[in-house]
Every structure is written in C-alpha cells, then in structure tokens.
Image (cartoon, rainbow, N blue to C red):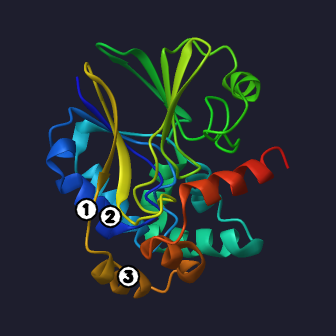
Amino acid sequence: MKVAALYDVHGNLPALEAVLADPRCVSADVVVCGGDLVVGPYPAECLDALEGLGRRVRFLTGNCDREAWQAPEDGELGEAARWSNDRLGAERVSRVSHWPLTVELDVPGLGAVLFCHATPSSDLPILTRATPAEDVARELGNVAADVVVCGHTHVQYDRRVGDVRLVNAGSVGMPYEGSPDARWALLDAGGVELVSTAYDTTAAREALEAPGFPLFEQWLVGVLEGRVTAEEATASFESRRGS
C-alpha cells in the first residue's frame, strides 16, 4: 500500500492540482486529506478535486474545516470561514461537517498509522519539531499507533518520541519552508518520504487573488513569495503553544 498524505491545502487549488498530477501522488493507493482543506480562495473546487478521486480518498477534519461549517461570527478567521462556507454551499458544508478527527490505516512495513490534523484527540494543539518530547508524549496520549501523521503547523518533520514516530506532512497550500513548493508526505513499505512539488506560483498568485478571499494578503502572499521560513514558523508556533 502507498499512501499520499495531503495536509493544509487551504483552498490553494493550483498547488493541489500540481500535487494530484505529481506521478508520486498518482501512484498512491490511498490519499488522506489531513484537514484544513476548505478555508481559502477555492474551497469548493479543492473539495471537488479530492472527492473526484472516489474511494481512494479519506478525509479528516482540521480546525479550519470545523470553522467553515460552524461559520463563527467573530474575528478574521470567522470572516474567512463564512466566506468559504458561502462558496461551498449547503451540501458540501454538510459533508465537511461529518469528517472524523482521525483516520487509521495499516501500512505494511510501517505498521499502524494514525492520521490526525493536530493530535489524535484535538485539531488545535501545536506540536513542532522543537516541542519537548515530554509535551509531545502528553499530547499524543496513549496512542497505540506505530506512526502518527499530523499537520497544522505547516512545517515538515519526522521525529521519534518514545515508541511513536511522529511525522508532519507539511502544507500543500501554505508551506512555511522558505519556498512556495507544495509539501506533502508519501508512506509505503519503504518508509516515509517528505516530498515537495513545484508549481507556477506567479500564475497561481493571480488566480488565488481573483476570488477575493478575505485573508489572501495575510495568509498567502508571503508564502507564495517564499518569505516564511521553517525556523521562523517553528519559533512562532512554539511561542504560542499552550497560550
């Protein structure tokens, strides 16, 4: 079995299309969408593209997906969530609202793999490559999986905490890696590969600005220009952890 883990697309359709066309993703038996898919410039189109994979795709929820169907009233994220909710339409929103918190697969060569957005019990906690091992262990709880794949912080890493291998697949649509290339992960009997897919970000910027997503400037411009580094993002997330 080969599994492609696609996290944190955030409505970036050009990035998602590039990953789905990548031969490494095309060859995957299962595609896990790891949350934070539908708050962004092209929420409906991104959902349709992944649902078009049929039975190959497994969805789980992220905090922004939850915001999209709850459509909160307050703050910038609330505005972006309502905007995305409107573009998804009632039927898509209903489907998003039923996504589970986790997906579990048995991957030969790796064992039991649990996919979650942030942690197995919540879509909000922050775990980075710099988070102390004891804090990671506490957040993972008594997880029985051999490998836990997460996202949420948009920086790829692969580390071991006790008996658990913790992998962050990175972000397809908003990578904090010092370049705009889409990041994702590939899991199979050979192990875990943290991969990237390049795409035309100049054309993408124009396309992503066109719909009028409220947080386009704040969320995407710096990413598309490769100005957000993994070191900066990790330090920022660690400063917010537990706050």
Badge 1 density bin: few <14, some 14–19, many ≥20, Cα 10 Å: some
Question: Percent x, y for residue 65?
Answer: 55, 54
23 to 158, vertically: above or below: below
- Which of these two is toward me, 72 or 114? 114
**Alpha carbon distance from label 3 to label 2:** 11 Å
Residue at left offset 29%, top offset 50%: 51
Q: For residue 161, what is the image quadrant? A: top right
Marks 1, 3: nearer the viewer: 3
Residue on which disc 2 sits = 15
Residue labelled with disc 1: 17
| Residue drawn at 25 percent across, 62 percent down | 17
Contact between labelled residues 2 and 1, with CB atoms less than 8 Å apart? yes
In front: 41, or 168? 168
Give the labeled residue for mark 3: 205
Quadrant assignment, res 64 = bottom right
The amino acid type found where label 1 is placed reads Glu
Q: Amino acid at mark 3?
A: Arg
Tag 2 secondary structure: helix
Q: Which amino acid, by three-letter code, is at mark 2? A: Ala
Secondary structure beneath dot 3 equals helix
